[in-house]
Image (cartoon, rainbow, N blue to C red):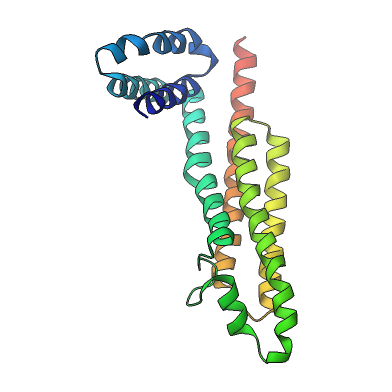
Amino acid sequence: MTTFLARAMLALAAATMGERHEGWARAMAGEVAAAAAEGKTLSFAFGCLIAAWRAALASSHGRFLLTSYAVAIGILLPMAALQIACVGFGLSYLYPGNHGLAGALLDGMATKWLWPFYQSAGPVLALLQLAIGIGHVRLAWVMLERDWTRALRWSARTLAASTTLIVFMGALFLNVRQSLIMGAVVGVELAILLIVSSWHADLSREVERTA
C-alpha cells in the first residue's frame, strides 16, 4: 500500500509538471528505490508532489494544470460518486425525508391505483441519475485530456439528463428541490468548463507566439 500511494503521488507530480519537466519526472521515479531502501518512500513522494505544486504555481501553464485537476478531482468525480451511490445504495440525497427513490415514489403516489405507473417510473429515474453520474466521470476524463469538443458534448448530455430528471420528478409530484440544486451545479460546472477551455486556448496561443 505504501508503494502504491508513493507511486500515485509521483504520477500526480509528473502530471502536474507536464511535458516541459519530463526529465525531472523521470529522475523522481528513479529515486523511489533509494527512498524505499531508507524507509522514506512516502515522505520522498510527498516532497516531490509539494515541489511540483510549488513549481506549477510559478507558471501560468502550471496553474492551469492545477486548476484542471482541482475541478476534475474536487468537483466532477465527487458528484459522479454521489449520483452513482444514490442509484446503487439507495441514498436519499435527491429525496430528503424519504428512504431513497422507492420511499419517495410511495410518498408521492396519490392513490394505490397509480402504483403500477409509479413502479414503472422508478427504473427510468434511476437510469437518468446513473447517466448523470457516468457523464461526470467521462467529463472529468476528457477534461484532463483537454479534449474540449468532447468535454462540451458530455456537459450538454449531463445537463440534458439532469433537466429530464427534474421534469420527470415534477410530473410525479416528487420533491424537486435537491434535483434543482443538482441541475444548477451542473450548469455551474459547464460555466467552469468554458472558462478553463478558454484559458487553455489563451495558453496555446501564447506558446505559439513564443515558439
Residue at point 64% right, 21% down?
A: 205
Q: Is residue 73 left or right of residue 175?
A: left
Q: Is residue 119 left or right of residue 210?
A: right
Location of residue 55 in the rendering, given as x and y in whole percent from the top left corner: 39, 20
- Residue nearest the viewer, comparing 145 with 107: 107
Q: Residue at 67% of width from left, 76% of height from top? A: 170
Q: Quadrant of the N terminus?
A: top left
Quadrant of image for the C terminus: top right
**Residue ID at (62%, 83%):** 108
Tell me which corner region of the image, top left, top right, bottom left or bottom right, holds residue 10. Answer: top left
Residue 113 in the figure: left or right of residue 31: right
Number of marks present in the image shown: 0
In the rendered image, residue 29, in percent from the top left (x then y), is placed at 42, 13
Image quarter for residue 94? Answer: bottom right
Position of 146 relative to 76 (above/below): above
Where does the image place residue 69, in percent across and percent down from the top left? 50, 34
Picture quadrant of residue 210: top right
Q: Specify whether residue 135 is in view.
A: yes
Residue 145, relative to residue 176: is it above or below?
A: above
Q: Is residue 59 visible?
A: no
As rendered, which of 195 and 49 lies closer to the eye?
Answer: 49
Give the residue drawn at x 45%, y 13%.
25
Residue 160 at x, y = what percent? 72, 57
